[in-house]
Image: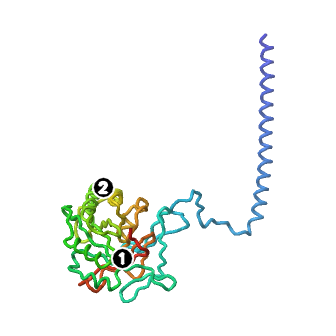
Amino acid sequence: MKKKKLSSITVIAIAESLVILLLVMFFAWYAFIYHCDDFSVKKAVTASTENEEPQVRRRAVIEKEETIYQLDGEKILMNDSTYGEVFMPVFKDVPKSTVDTDSVVTRNGYSFYKQKGKVTSIAGIDISEHQGEIDWQQVKDAGIEFAFIRVGCRTYGGGEIVFDERFAENLAKADEVGIKTGVYFFSQALTPDEAIEEADAVIDAISPYNITYPVVFDWEIIYDDSARTDKISVNDLADCCVSFCERVESAGYKPMIYQNKGTAMCKLDLPKLTKYDFWLAEYGDKPTYYYEYKIWQYASDGKVPGIEGDVDLNIAFADCSQ
């Protein structure tokens, strides 16, 4: 019995050894053949490309959906005292200005807008009690057709509402000589409630007068002193603009927002304010503001007969009367 068992085990061991040997030989042969074929392919590829210039991707391929930053490559370029030329992407939902700046003509300190050789702009001024007593007939004879008159302001320190000492006189006398009048309020509102309070004060003050031009929300940064509005947020400012304008509109007047180019670009949330006409303050021979505006304030040192000292000069590109 033992002898027979040993014999069977030996046979099995020999068979297993033969199988392993065959498998090793097969894999060795396969590896040798594959290596030769791969070497031949690589050699052929190298031979066919050794005289060609290497391909270099010099510009990244941007594979993403078009965004506001890619909108036809449009950028608004401005100058900054620290960075030099800076840019902002264009808001596609804010209407672009249709003013042809090449049609703006400045002569003897006055600007005009000419189309097909004809002046189509309307000349105007904006004034406050600082101009003192005004001879409105002389102003009218000088070619001024509209005037924005300050009703009052909110103080930038204590936040009190104060009325302009001459607003009633100026509104009445300008209207008497046929000058179209609008009004503005110098705001320092911090909240929508304060903006509504300002609007209500203006509406009550102007109710006896013939107001044919817009009622304007004039919110400004105080540059030469600290002010209660120094740290107002973008959202709060936009809410103040909307609140004032909506209140004015509900009272039957045409609202408008006044702002200089820099603050408009950097502080106003313009897409929220497209419902309201815009009055641009940008001093120079030609406006450069990208978006739509109805009135352009182009100088603060203008001279007009009937007014002592400097006065702000404006042109309207269309009749803004109600």
Residue at left offset 32%, top offset 75%: 147
The answer to whether residue 240 of the structure is visible from this angle is no
User: Is 20 positioned to the left or the right of 301 in the image?
Assistant: right
User: Is 301 positioned to the left or the right of 11 in the image?
Assistant: left
Tell which residue pokes out farthest to the front in this image: 176
Q: Amino acid at mark 1?
A: Gln
Q: What quarter of the picture does the N terminus occupy?
A: top right
User: Is 198 positioned to the left or the right of 65 in the image?
Assistant: left
Q: Which mark identifies residue 192?
A: 2
Q: To which quarter of the image does residue 176 belong?
A: bottom left
Tell which residue pokes out farthest to the top in this image: 1
Mark pair 1, 2: CA separation: 27 Å
Q: Position of residue 44 (x, y in %)?
A: 79, 60
The answer to whether residue 175 of the structure is visible from this angle is yes
Q: Are marks 1 and 2 in contact (CB under 8 Å)?
A: no
Q: Nearer the viewer, residue 164 or 62?
A: 164
Q: Which residue is mark 1?
A: 297
Q: Is residue 266 above or below residue 139?
A: above
First in sequence: mark 1 or mark 2?
Answer: 2
Q: Is residue 244 above or below residue 9?
A: below
Q: Amino acid at mark 2?
A: Pro
Crowding near the residue tagged with mark 2, few <14, some 14–19, many ≥20 C-alpha atoms within 10 Å: some
Q: Nearer the viewer, residue 244 or 75?
A: 244
Tell which residue pokes out farthest to the bottom in this image: 108
